[in-house]
Amino acid sequence: LITNDDDNEADNDNESENSPNNVLRRMLLPMYSTCNNADNDGNVDKDNDDNNFKQKEKSDDINISISDSSIIKVLLRIDLFQSMLLSSLLQKLPELVSLDDDNDDNENDRTKRPTTPRNNDAENDDIARLLPKLILTHIKWLDYILEPHSLLNTLLQILTICSTNRNLQLDILSTLPEITSCASIDGGDDNDDDLMEMTTNSLRELYADDPGLLVPCLDALGNMSLGKEGQEEVLKDALQAFHSASCWSLPAIAKFVMGAIPTSFAGGGGFGSGGLGATNTICQAVVSSLRLLQLTSGTDNDDDADGNALTLEALSQGMQYRANLSDALLNSIKKQPPPSAAASQQRSGNGAVLTKSDVWLLLCCAHAPHNRGKVQALVRKLAVKGGIGNYSGAGSGLGAGLTEAVLTNAIRGNGRMLACLWTSSLEMAESLVRNPEAAAQRLGGHWYQLLFTEFKQPIHRQEVIASLVTHIGSESNPEVDTAMIVLTNLSSSRLNNTDGTGCNGATALKPFAPFFNIVV
């Protein structure tokens, strides 16, 4: 016997199963078929039908065949249905977004009331949240699109309308590059240029209104074939964001900048505000902006250091494959100080100093093996002529004090951030100590001390000690003296362990006693 309550519950289940959203979800999911295992004749044993059913249920004796395609995907492959079906699916997106927003409001109200069991409406709400992603996934992986221009225009409109749903915006942004590639194949050059201009302008307006969408928009634009003018404008926005974005947005911005650098400007107009527009070379404009980059200095426990480390890693990888950018950086440091230092030099009349950003960029450039020799030669020249401490190189500007201050500011407190540049830093110190000039050797010795003090991991400190022992074994007396001075200074210093506790230098050096036994 079925009671009224059971009857109502069954009706509600049927109503939920046949709701429009549930039907659409089934049409978007892969098709599947189920069948029971049968005898060789193809018939189920009727005498033991109930027993067989239970055994099959327990032993998973039911065969399930899943197709790679859904009903919607099959229909989208038919030219006659594709445009009409895509239009209907896209019209469904704003409706689902508004339903999702209403559900969030109802959910907030429900938390203020006593908890009630979930009903069919709640299940439909969950389905409505998944449908936009399923729809966009089908559009993203279409084999071909008959009317990409119309589809792209509609998606850009939805992107603006559905500004309250961040997940939908991110899904649409990840879909745009696939559609623009189809449009580039389908249309001519003129149509392609107009389409890229429309897309670029729409996305620029989007992240201008919502800076939180800057990184997803740059990621989408980086996968499109932008025109020269559009690429210029987007690159300007990315460079400006370098000085205002959060530390966790900087790695993606740096990666975009490294990949978006063209050979030269499309036109002769100025680029940026760093005073390098007259050079008519975009690499120099990028270098000017990077030299003003101020990453937040922190301790090993600072979470921002991880974001800064990823930024430096993106820059080092970009310079590894951008010879023009590496050359522009080295030439810029050779010829002139950074803009901020130039201004201070004009006001005070004294030589301007390099910033810690310049040291970081040099290490990023030296990360590539084919750039390492050029960077080391430049650093040795700056150390000998007092370039790091004093651009004019006049008077007593060759003193190690200014040089040590620059390096200390760049390395101390930034060990976690500079971990990806460890090899570059160590080889730079080795190169300076091997230089016959006393100024370069002093700079290299101080560099060794900073590395041993800042990088507390045993593997890092072991590499420093091994390098110093190698210097002691050389035939150059100044090189031997520099290495011995570094070890003496370390033994009398107050150092920190990996756990944050302090210890004297002799205790910190004790684990590396076998190296000193070799020297003796």
Image (cartoon, helix red, strand yellow):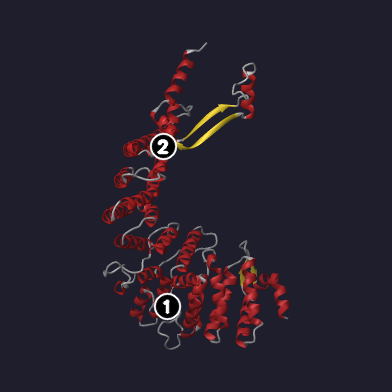
**Residue position for label 1:** 353
- Residue at the spot 38% in from the left edge and 80% down from the top edge: 335
Q: Position of residue 122 (x, y in %)?
A: 44, 30
- Residue at the spot 46% in from the left edge and 35% down from the top edge: 29
284 relative to 361 in the view: left or right? left
**Residue position for label 2:** 74
Name above or below for residue 208 compared with residue 133: below
Rate crowding at label 2 as few (under 14), some (14 to 19) or many (20 or more) other CA atoms within 10 Å. few
- Residue at the spot 43% in from the left edge and 89% down from the top edge: 395
- Residue at the spot 37% in from the left edge and 36% down from the top edge: 96
Q: Where is residue 165 in the image (x, y as percent from the top left)?
A: 37, 43
Name above or below for residue 124 compared with residue 415: above
Q: What element does badge 1 sit on?
A: loop
Closer to viewer: mark 2 or mark 1: 2
Amino acid carrying mark 2 in the image: Val
Residue nearer the viewer, 185 or 156: 185
Tell me if residue 174 can be seen.
Answer: yes
Q: Where is residue 8 in the image (x, y as percent from the top left)?
A: 45, 17
Q: In which quarter of the image is residue 249?
A: bottom left
Q: Position of residue 293 (x, y in %)?
A: 41, 67
Q: Which residue lies furthest to the top in this view?
A: 1
Q: Residue furthest front?
A: 41
Q: What element does badge 2 sit on?
A: helix
Q: In which quarter of the image is residue 161?
A: top left
Amino acid carrying mark 1 in the image: Val
224 relative to 490 in the view: left or right? left
Which label was assigned to residue 122?
none
